[in-house]
Image: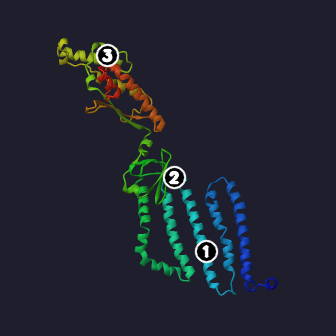
């Protein structure tokens, strides 16, 4: 040591603080050695193992923070006996060590949350929000502890003083507390999970949930934009969750066609004969003809006054055709709600509503099925002597004004 001290006799500051200089040099060496061992040796060993747990717990961020601890301990272990500011430096080093430990612990918490989310039970839960709450509590405790170390006061005495500041802390962390409570309610009632498709018109949200954090929920909309909404809004604002549809495996088709009321009429014998060639209603027509004939015979209905008895209508036959057509499609769920119903007539005609479920939840496949069904419906309607109601276009009005009614 005396020999080394002789090298610095020309520099008074270094001569007086030779231990501090050596400690700084050793700390720098320790940092590079630790970093090299951690990143080149441990990191490689971690990557070679079959399990993913060590990859998560010993990730680059954790190793980088750990690499600061040995050099800080070396610096702290040296007694700066020649410096008048020895106590201040010790306090600063203690605070820095505490801060690095705090960062390392929070990095481990992130790793623990990542491991927990690998279990199927917790995969779609907002565990990230709970982890953020724990980190906030640790940061508050850590900051108070660091302030105590810097000022030389007992940290536990500072914690006792926090009771008087509780009202201020509640005001500062109001949003955090509300978001935490919202996260608990979201989990308890299973309102949303990562991957759920939700709609929230207030925020223009229509897409899949990417991430649920303490304060925010990130949603990727179907137009590929990303919307970030407050977690609290899932409790305060109504929204639609399509998870039930996805779990059922069927997506609803609910659409109406409007028929011109003037085209509705009783079926003639010629019409019924034509309908018997339709595979979907051939048996229905034969059965109804026999049933109606028997009924009218029992009542002795005069054929010339057929309106006194029963008779098929083109719209009733059309509805039966639609039901048979849809029941014969394999891409329609027969075990879910299945309706072809007549709604109250409006100024736009008589609505015939199709209320069924496609046997898929994939958007593109669903749209293809729906389009294919209504392509067929629009094409088959004229075969039943029915007309679709449609507001007159400019072309129609020109023909009417020219004396060429459609």
Please name the residue shown 28% across and 16% down the image.
289
Element at label 3: helix
Work out which quarter of the rendered image holds the C terminus and state it: top left
How packed mark 2 is, by other alpha carbons closer than 10 Å (few <14, some 14-19, many 20 or more), is some
**Labels 3, 1: front one:** 1
Q: Distance between the residues labelled 3 and 1?
A: 92 Å
Name the spot of residue 53 as percent of width and height, x first. 61, 57
Tell me: residue 337, above or below residue 288: below
Horizontal side of residue 240 vs 223, given as left or right: left
Name the spot of residue 86 as percent of width and height, x first. 65, 85
**Which colouring convention does the figure follow?**
rainbow
How packed mark 3 is, by other alpha carbons closer than 10 Å (few <14, some 14-19, many 20 or more), is some
Q: How far apart are marks 1 and 2 (CA)?
A: 36 Å
Nearer the observer, 40 or 239: 239
* N-terminal-most mark, 3 or 2: 2
* N-terminal-most mark, 1 or 2: 1
Tell me: residue 8, above or below residue 339: below
Tell me: residue 54, above or below residue 295: below
- State the mark number for residue 286: 3
**Labels 1, 2: front one:** 1
Name the spot of residue 293 as percent of width and height, x first. 24, 15
Q: Quadrant of residue 398?
A: top left
Please name the residue shown 42% across and 56% down the image.
186
Please name the residue shown 61% across and 83% down the image.
88
Write down the residue under mark 2.
123
Q: How far apart are marks 3 and 2 (CA)?
A: 58 Å
Write down the residue under mark 1.
96
Work out which quarter of the rendered image holds the N terminus and state it: bottom right
Element at label 1: helix
């Amino acid at each position: 040591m005396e020999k080394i001290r002789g090298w610095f006799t020309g520099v008074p500051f270094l001569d007086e603080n030779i231990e501090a200089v050596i400690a700084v040099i050793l700390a720098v060496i320790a940092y590079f050695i630790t970093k090299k061992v951690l990143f080149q040796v441990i990191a490689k060993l971690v990557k070679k193992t079959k399990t993913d747990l060590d990859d998560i717990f010993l990730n680059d961020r954790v190793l980088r923070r750990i690499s600061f601890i040995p050099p800080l301990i070396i610096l702290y272990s040296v007694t700066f006996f020649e410096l008048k500011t020895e106590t201040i430096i010790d306090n600063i080093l203690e605070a820095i060590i505490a801060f690095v430990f705090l960062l390392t612990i929070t990095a481990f918490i992130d790793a623990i949350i990542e491991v927990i989310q690998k279990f199927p039970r917790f995969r779609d839960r907002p565990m990230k929000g709970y982890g953020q709450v724990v980190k906030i509590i640790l940061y508050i405790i850590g900051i108070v502890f660091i302030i105590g170390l810097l000022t030389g006061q007992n940290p536990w005495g500072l914690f006792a003083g926090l009771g008087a500041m509780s009202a201020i802390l509640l005001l500062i962390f109001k949003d955090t507390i509300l978001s935490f409570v919202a996260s608990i309610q979201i989990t308890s009632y299973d309102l949303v999970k990562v991957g759920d498709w939700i709609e929230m018109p207030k925020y223009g949200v229509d897409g899949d949930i990417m991430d649920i954090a303490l304060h925010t929920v990130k949603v990727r909309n179907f137009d590929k934009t990303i919307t970030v909404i407050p977690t609290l809004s899932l409790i305060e604002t109504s929204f639609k969750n399509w998870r039930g549809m996805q779990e059922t495996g069927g997506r609803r088709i609910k659409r109406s066609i409007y028929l011109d009321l003037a085209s509705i009429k009783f079926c003639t014998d010629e019409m019924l004969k034509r309908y018997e060639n339709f595979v979907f209603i051939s048996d229905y027509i034969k059965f109804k003809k026999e049933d109606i004939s028997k009924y009218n015979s029992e009542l002795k209905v005069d054929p010339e006054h057929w309106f006194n008895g029963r008779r098929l209508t083109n719209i009733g036959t059309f509805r039966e055709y639609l039901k048979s057509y849809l029941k014969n499609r394999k891409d329609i769920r027969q075990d879910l709600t299945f309706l072809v119903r007549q709604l109250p007539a409006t100024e736009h005609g008589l609505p015939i509503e199709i209320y069924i479920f496609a046997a898929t939840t994939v958007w593109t496949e669903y749209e293809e099925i729906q389009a294919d069904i209504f392509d067929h419906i629009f094409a088959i309607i004229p075969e039943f002597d029915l007309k679709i109601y449609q507001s007159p276009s400019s072309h129609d009005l020109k023909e009417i004004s020219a004396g060429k009614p459609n």
